Amino acid sequence: MLKEISSCSVGSDGVTRLPFTKEHKRALKIITKWMVDSGLSTRIDDAGTLIGKYNGPKNAPTFLVGSHQDSVINGGMFDGIMGVLLPLIAIRNLNNLPYNIEFLAFADEEGIRFPTSLLGSRALAGTLSPTVLNIKDNQGLSIRDAIKNLNLVPENIFNLKREKQKYLGFLEVHIEQGPILYNKNLPLGTVSSISGIERHDLSIYGLSSHAGTMPMIYRKDALCAASEIILMSEKLASNCSNAVATVGMLNIQPNVANVIPEKANLILEVRSGSDVERENLSSNIIKNVNDIINRRKLEVKINKTYEQSATKCDNDLQLILSDSLDDAAGYKFHLDSGATHDASAISDLCPISMLFVRCKNGISHNPEEEASEEDMALAVKVIENFFKRLSTII
Ligand SMILES: [Zn+2]
């Protein structure tokens, strides 16, 4: 089934399925069929989220489950869409649940086509920016027009906000996208927390001069300072049990072979499932940045450009999920998610939980991304157990 839907893609090098495109339209037809085959009624909301409804008793509360249909460019065939499919298979083996379930296939999680993300999940949580519809893709087409292309009414996305008290919680099943389960030789794990993120823009100012005539002791080389900062960040983060630091972007000026760099601009990103650990690591790095800059007699401007707190998975749901994992696989294992997911946005609406499926070699956002059939079958079993166990607490 995943293979079939992976053909809804621009090109055949991995999967490229962006929201509100003809590939998305083709995928919607397939997902609709999956939902109907699972005995669900279907509808699409104005953010392009396809919703399959399992009807429990009248006036019963509702549980939400799902993930996103879209991919990155030349991505894998499991990221997102696997979390749409597996719960739809699990429900086929169940009946008489004392609650409703909505199975969700969000249009846009990745934020590849438009410079914003989590459109469908934010719409349900009521956390969309009022100007979101004006955001344009690189062809100049706005989200407003893209939504219209799916015959939906863009302005309605602001009316999709759900009432908190009606929802029991949310489960997202997702490929891990990292190597932890693979290296521990475990098929599945329950997520404790989705990492918080902060980004700092560092501009380092030195002095450019002739690369041949300026002796080493008189230099103010901005790139050498940046290099020291990058390695210092790596070292400090390596000593943390639960935090990571990355410099993924670096620009130097004038970027010429025979001129000492006078300016280096880099972006430092720090993530952790624990806000305290993230804040400790980043303040430790910044302190060391200032020490390096002072010792080298350079200048630095540091700007925090982004901060998002960690999202804790709900304790009760996590307990039910790890018991469900234990029933199916005979073990429990928790890990943090270093990546953001739809669950992060849904946490503003209701309690969330996540189940990770082992990712071969930890490779994701790549055509080589792979989850095994055995691991996915076990995940289906865990979802079934989870839905049954959830019945007992209603
Ligand atoms: Zn994803």
Image (cartoon, helix red, strand yellow):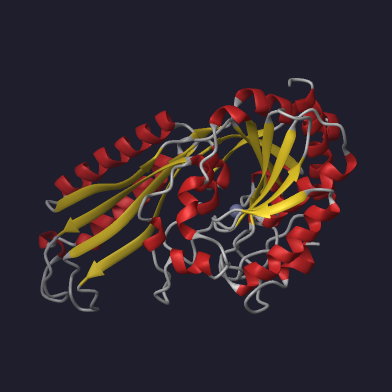
The image quadrant that residue 225 belongs to is bottom left
The image quadrant that residue 184 belongs to is top right
- Residue nearest the observer in this picture, 373 or 236: 373
Q: Position of residue 158 (x, y in %)?
A: 46, 48
Q: Position of residue 228 (x, y in %)?
A: 30, 53
- Residue nearest the observer in this picture, 213 or 240: 240
Q: Quadrant of the N terminus?
A: bottom right
Q: Position of residue 210 (x, y in %)?
A: 12, 75
* Left or right of 311, for residue 8: right
Q: Can residue 76 be seen from the camera position used here? A: yes
Q: Can residue 372 be seen from the camera position used here? A: no
Q: Residue at x 45, y 37 (%)?
A: 239
Q: How many marks?
A: 0
* Left or right of 208, for residue 28: right
Q: Residue at x 57, y 67 (%)?
A: 151
- Residue nearest the observer in this picture, 228 or 90: 90
Examine the rendered structure and indicate whether residue 249 appears above or below residue 232.
below
Q: Position of residue 327 (x, y in %)?
A: 84, 29
Q: Quadrant of the C terminus?
A: top right
* Left or right of 102, for residue 199: left
* Left or right of 185, for residue 214: left
Q: Residue at x 68, y 78 (%)?
A: 12
